[in-house]
Image: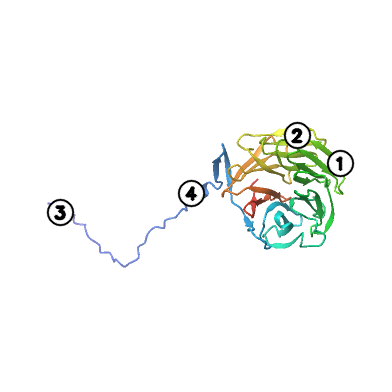
Amino acid sequence: PYSPPDNFFIESVDLWSPLKLDPVQLIPVPDRRTLNRTETRYKNGSYRQILKSIRSLGEYGDGNNAFREPNSCAWLECGKLAVVDTNAHCIKIFNSDIGQFEYSFGRGRTLGCQNLLYPYRIAVVPGGNDELVVIQRHPRPQIHIFTCKGEFIHRFGQHLEKPRALTVDKLHRIIVIESQIQKLHIFSFDGKILSLFNLNEQLIFPTSICSNNSEIFISDNHLHSIKVFSYHGQLLREIKEDNYIMFPTNIKLNIKGQLIVIDNHQGLNITVYDEYEQKKRLGAYTARICHSQILDVAIESNQKNILHLASKDYRVYTYQIPL
């Protein structure tokens, strides 16, 4: 049988005494969700980074923070956001940082606006006093110009038939594209016709327009592309990329001159191209939620790349593009 050695002994342990253990350094393991901070989604044949909206404002109704048809929006250099409410015949002004309503003007609301009927699109005069250029739609298409406070300045363009979109360049030229008849109008700020071009051979369904002061960009929903024209009406080039530019509805240029393309094919899609003839794609994005139809887009003219999107669900959503 087994016999313990002579020096073998058993030491009793106090069960209530604190144990002296060597300290163990705990190394935090990063959350799996933070390992890849940029979520992507494969969509329509391309990978897009998923964006989450910063905020949204609006609902259906007639209140200060409600809309009946928010067809257009524009960012003012004083930090305000103007939203066109077509069926309410007015323009509502909000603080763009927090979305707080400030004031409104329009038919039945302010003096000098009795002739404002179904305002449809809006643009801000850059580098000025934030004057607002507003286009009316059928039954009485024309252009109205207001101060940022809603004081009427003048109106013109009664010969317009199907105005679809407008922009104002740095020389305060007002550029309007008409759908169905594909006419491009260039006006001076006081309403004089500077140029008129028929673009039937180049366009089918123009949806949006912007300018870098030397070139005019027009999106075409049916041609799945962006056409670039000179101020003399000459077609300079076409921006077209399968799986990225599909059904463009809105285009904007940021402060660097980079082109931002919005389309609604199976939800919100945002694609950005460089400022050097748009030969390089800088980013492709989509929204975390499936948006209703995007009616118009405004971009802040600063380094933040913040977009405000007017939607058919009576809201205005704000996104920041991580460029």
Q: Which mark is residue 200?
A: 2
Q: How many marks?
A: 4
Tag 4 residue: 32
Tag 3 residue: 3
User: Is 33 left or right of 283, judged from the image as shown?
Assistant: left
In the rendered image, which quarter is residue 85 located in?
bottom right
Indicate which label's residue lies in the foreground, 3 or 4: 4
Residue shown at the point (68%, 58%) measured from the top left: 97
Residue 194 horizontal/vertical position (percent): 86, 41
Sequence-first tag of 3 and 4: 3
Picture layout, residue 24 above or below residue 280: below
Sort mark 1 into few (<14), some (14-19) or many (20+) by Cα contacts within 10 Å.
few
User: Is 293 left or right of 156, judged from the image as shown?
Assistant: left
- Say which amino acid is labelled 4: Arg
Q: Which mark is residue 194?
A: 1
Measure the C-alpha gap from mark 1 to mark 3. Answer: 115 Å
Sequence-first tag of 1 and 2: 1
